[in-house]
Image (cartoon, rainbow, N blue to C red):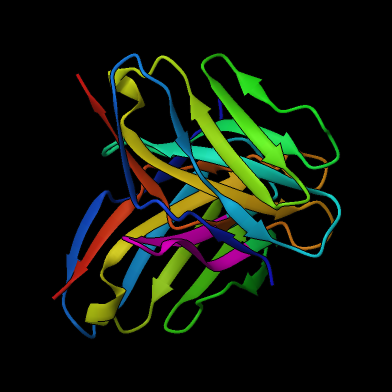
Amino acid sequence: AQTVTQSQPEMSVQEAETVTLSCTYDTSESDYYLFWYKQPPSRQMILVIRQEAYKQQNATENRFSVNFQKAAKSFSLKISDSQLGDAAMYFCAYRKIQGAQKLVFGQGTRLTINP
Amino acid sequence: DVKVTQSSRYLVKRTGEKVFLECVQDMDHENMFWYRQDPGLGLRLIYFSYDVKMKEKGDIPEGYSVSREKKERFSLILESASTNQTSMYLCATFQGASGTGELFFGEGSRLTVL
């Protein structure tokens, strides 16, 4: 079974600095999707960034980028120029491309932005 | 934009009560999911449905059942609520095998069982 592990329950960063959230996963599949989701306080979860495993290039979305290391099964999220609005729970997630459509989530990392 | 609406943001129920959590989506998505969110455990899948009247167990189905009579509505049922079912429940949808795999979430239903 696939598993996703986020080893940092909490992280904090100064506003305007850069922070990296870690995620590792375990799978025997060769092709799959990886995601980072953001859950702001009392608001709904939204997608931050997505990576297809067959793409070697790391995905980027404005200030958000990933470091995808397929062989190491590592998928970290880097947030540059952190803003107060980035404060949230961040979840790493995995999904197979074939078969069952469900996403498997990590435990989450609570990110605090210090002004 | 996809809209996923959960009927109740906050509920307080007593042990043994039957509880219904409703989820409605407006984008004709085939797949719908119920997750449970607990601190330190992340999101765990309870049940999912890939079509009307179709359902599959997730990782933690015990104590729960679901109903999907119409494509846009997916209900989670706690037949006899227990205190260990106190949690945040999240409904989510996505389009299907041809989609990108992105889940669209509702705002969540925080259930407290006394």
What are the residue bounds of the magenta stretch? B33-48
Q: Quadrant of residue A25?
A: bottom right
Residue at 60% across / 19% down in the picture? A61
Asked whether residue B39 is drawn in magenta, I would say yes
- Whether B81 is drawn above or below B37: the answer is below
Q: A115 left or right of B58?
A: left
Q: Position of residue B106 (x, y in %)?
A: 43, 43
Asked whether residue A86 is drawn in magenta, I would say no
Residue at 62% across / 31% down in the picture? A66
- Whether A107 is drawn above or below A78: the answer is below
- The answer to whether one can see residue A34 in this image is yes
Label tally: 0
Tell me the quarter of the image containing the C terminus of chain A.
top left
Q: Residue furthest left?
A: B114
- The answer to whether one can see residue B72 in this image is no
Residue at 72% across / 42% down in the picture? A69
Q: Position of residue B29 (x, y in %)?
A: 67, 43
Q: Position of residue B50 (x, y in %)?
A: 71, 59
Assign the magenta stretch its main secondary structure. Answer: strand
Tell me the quarter of the image containing the N terminus of chain A.
bottom right
Q: B48 left or right of A111?
A: right
Towards the viewer: A41 or B54: A41
- Whether B37 is drawn above or below B114: the answer is above
Towards the viewer: A19 or A3: A19
Q: Position of residue B14 (x, y in %)?
A: 16, 77
Towards the viewer: B48 or A92: A92
Towards the viewer: A100 or A106: A106
Residue at 51% across / 45% down in the picture? A22
